[in-house]
Amino acid sequence: MKTIVVEGNFDCFILNTLFPDSKVKIRIAQGFSNVLSVSRTLIDYGFDVLIVLDTDTNVSGLDNRMIIQRLMNNDLIDYHLNIVWMDSCIEIVLGKVSSDFINLNKRNKNLIKDILLKNKDAILNLKEFQVIQEFIDK
């Protein structure tokens, strides 16, 4: 079974809106610090896992890619992790398609859904979302 692990509810909402007919389960890890443990557990149970993470490069001195790399060098060598990086976060990546995503009120789900669906074709042409689509399709 395939599973996509995301950091939070907003990421889950975005992916469920863009990929509504997907047979892939999306699991929310409730933050960056939990993503690896949730993913490792799923992998141990035989799931094919794709992780969607923010790089958080907008925060001075923080790049989550470096943290993951350090952990993989030490602890996760036996785990093959498929990761899609949203640089610096999913809103910024979506902002490449429409400035409506920048400084978006995450509580207005109806507006977000409308903007996503209006821009769906362009969003799915972004490399990050192409990787997600390939994972779903394979």
Image (cartoon, helix red, strand yellow):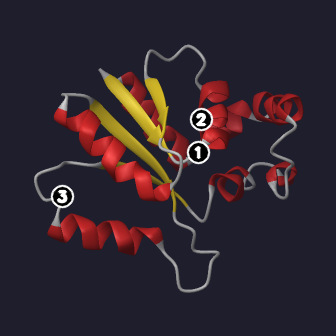
- Seen from this angle, which residue lies furthest left? 78
Residue 107, given in percent of the width and then of the height, sits at: 84, 40
Residue 10, given in percent of the width and then of the height, sits at: 67, 41
Residue 113 appears left or right of 52: right
Residue at screen point 35% across, 42% down: 38
Mark 2 → mark 1, Cα distance in angstroms: 6 Å
Q: Is residue 15 above or below residue 81?
A: above
Give the mark toward the camera: 2 or 1: 1
Q: Are marks 2 and 1 in contact (CB under 8 Å)?
A: yes
Give the residue type at disc 2: Cys
Q: Which residue is mark 2?
A: 12
Helix or strand or loop: what does disc 3 sit on?
loop
Give the residue type at disc 3: Leu
Residue at screen point 22% across, 36% down: 43
Q: Badge 2, how many Cα within 10 Å: few under 14, some, many 20+?
A: some
Q: Specify the quadrant of the image occupied by residue 137.
A: top left
Q: Specify the quadrant of the image occupied by residue 46.
A: top left
Q: Badge 3, how many Cα within 10 Å: few under 14, some, many 20+?
A: some
Residue at screen point 64% across, 52% down: 90
Q: Which residue is mark 1?
A: 8
Q: Which residue is mark 3?
A: 76
Residue 97 appears left or right of 32: right
Which of the pair 122/81 is nearer the observer? 81
Residue at screen point 80% across, 45% down: 106
Residue 108, given in percent of the width and then of the height, sits at: 87, 37
Mark 3 → mark 2, Cα distance in angstroms: 25 Å
Give the quadrant of the C terminus. Answer: top left
Give the residue type at disc 1: Gly
